[in-house]
Image (cartoon, rainbow, N blue to C red):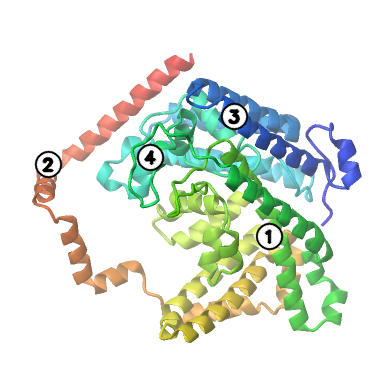
Amino acid sequence: MATSTSCTGSTLLQPISKIIDLPLDQVNFVVCQLFALVTAFWFRLYLHPSKTSPFIRHVVATLLGFYLALFCFGWYALHFLVQSGLAYGVMIFTSVEHMHKYCFVVTLGYLSFCQVTRVYVFDYGMYSADFTGPMMVITQKITSLAFEIHDGLMKREEHLKPSQKYLAVRKMPSLLEYLSYNCNFMGILAGPTCSYNDYIAFIEGQCYESKHLESNGKENGKFKQCDPSPKRDVIQKLCTCALSLMVYLVIYTACPTERAINDTFMASNPFYIQVLYLYISMLALRPKYYFVWTLADAINNAAGFGFNGYNTDGTPKWDRISNLRILNIEFATSFKMFLDNWNIQTSLWLKRVCYERCPYNPTAATFLLSAIWHGVYPGYYLTFITGIVVTMAARAVRHNVRQHFLGSATLKLIYDVITWFSTQMAICYTVVPFVLLAVGPSLKFYSSWYCCIHLLCVFLVLVLPVKSRRTKQQEQPGMVQASEQNCLSSEAESHMRARRAARPAHSAVRNSNINTERHRAAISSLRSNNT
């Protein structure tokens, strides 16, 4: 695949691009991220919440974000505003009962429209830094916020899961807050996605208060102490970025994935050499994503965003919005473990807006949504369809085989080695179409492997049974009953539940009406303020 050298953004750095022999859009992206890193330190030190109002912090973060977007993508950055504006209009002018669904369709639809035009109208091969990349992150933020507003204004507390209670948004954001959340300079180019409540807490300076814990985990109450410094974590992440970039430029340049389907290469090398080459190629490809996501994480940390409490030794943790855990990825012993540690914030988004809410076959629906969100290249769909089968097979093997290897440390080690090797091969096999993009090369690769992993996974799914959670709960009524009794342990809670049960049936409707009126009042107030 030939990468396009066209650039829609600024040409100011064209001489640097020619010197280092890299596409200008990639040079613009890296330079803008480095500029955002320096700006993030300034933002944390000189626009600290103790010195500056949230309004000023919102304005500065938003304007800097728009500037970086224009520098990288030129007037294509207007798509960010159009997408955000359409979704905000839906939030304002539709009822809260269905607002989250309309926002989901409109936002994802506009993203897909831009991806189709970019791929099939302008340039099929332009796969480097393009304007739809930031739109993917904005899509996550808009849809997440829509569901969080729906949970906060429509659902009763007892109907929300603990994570949904924390994420629920109780009032409509203003236009400035909304744009700042979507387009701030820290995450406009590469994310990561974060919850709206976490972002507002960061802007208002409340993100440290609930996290100021001593090493023993007890609250110390000294909120007036200095904020924890992210300097150590930022330096570590920048070192990781440098190492990742070096590995990618040196090894992947010598071992591109496209060679795996080269006729001469396949004819002159035995199959085990082709397998080894594929693993090395994919191992060298991943550092490109490590570089982008770790640098984005470092930028947010430098601005003071991402604090997640303290470790047991008293050192601060800055991993609240981290997007990956490299060691867990490279030493993953299951397909699920790999996915849980790769692009973490996207996995959480898929879980919150799809997996936890889809009534039918949530696994397949989640993979399908992930494919649509990534774009319109056929390779994406081949990868995620394969991922469905591999996930089901891995789940079946784990449920039926793993318990037989837990008898001793030696057996457990043997199981871990086998599952690590199987996981790495399954990931490499699954992801090849994601890299090759087109149908022809992807099918050529799978046919060269005789679709062996597809056939093996289908066989395992058909042969090895996996019981659903609902079936397990039905077979273990004693455990369910004991769990329910634990929830009613105190006499006061029993009385409260009895009072709730005695309420008339129309109380739920009345509560819904109250939430709807609350939403309408918030919308009216918001419209008047914006006017």
Q: Which residue is mark 3?
A: 43
Marks 4 and 3: in contact by CB < 8 Å?
no
Q: CA distance from mark 1 to mark 4?
A: 35 Å
The numbered mark, 3 or 4, whose residue comes first in the sequence reads: 3
In the foreground, 22 or 330: 330
Q: Are marks 2 and 4 in contact (CB under 8 Å)?
A: no
Quick one: 151 or 252, which is closer to the camera? 252
**Label 1, label 2: how many angstroms apart (C-alpha)?**
56 Å
Identify residue for label 2.
503
Which comes before the other along the chain, label 1 or label 2? 1
- Image position, residue 288 (x, y; %): 71, 55
| In this rendering, the label closer to the viewer, 2 or 4 | 4
Q: Identify the element where label 4 is drawn.
A: helix
Q: Amino acid at mark 1?
A: Arg
Q: Earlier in the sequence, mark 2 or mark 3?
A: 3
- Residue at 61 percent across and 66 percent down: it is 330
CA separation, marks 3 and 4? 22 Å
**Image marks 1 and 2: residues in contact by CB distance under 8 Å:** no
Check the image and report above or below for 283 versus 128. Answer: below
Residue 388 screen position, x and y as percent: 54, 66
Of marks 2 and 3, the one in the foreground: 3
Residue on which the image places disc 1? 286
Could one spot residue 432 in this view of the protein?
A: yes
Q: At 84% from the left edge and 71% from the top edge, which residue is drawn?
A: 262
Q: Nearer the viewer, mark 1 or mark 4?
A: 4
Q: Amino acid at mark 2?
A: Arg
Earlier residue among tags 2 and 4: 4
Q: Are marks 1 and 3 in contact (CB under 8 Å)?
A: no
Q: Nearer the viewer, mark 1 or mark 3?
A: 3
Q: Quadrant of the N terminus?
A: bottom right
Q: Which secondary structure, mark 2?
A: loop
Tell me which label, 1 or 4, sits earlier in the chain. 4
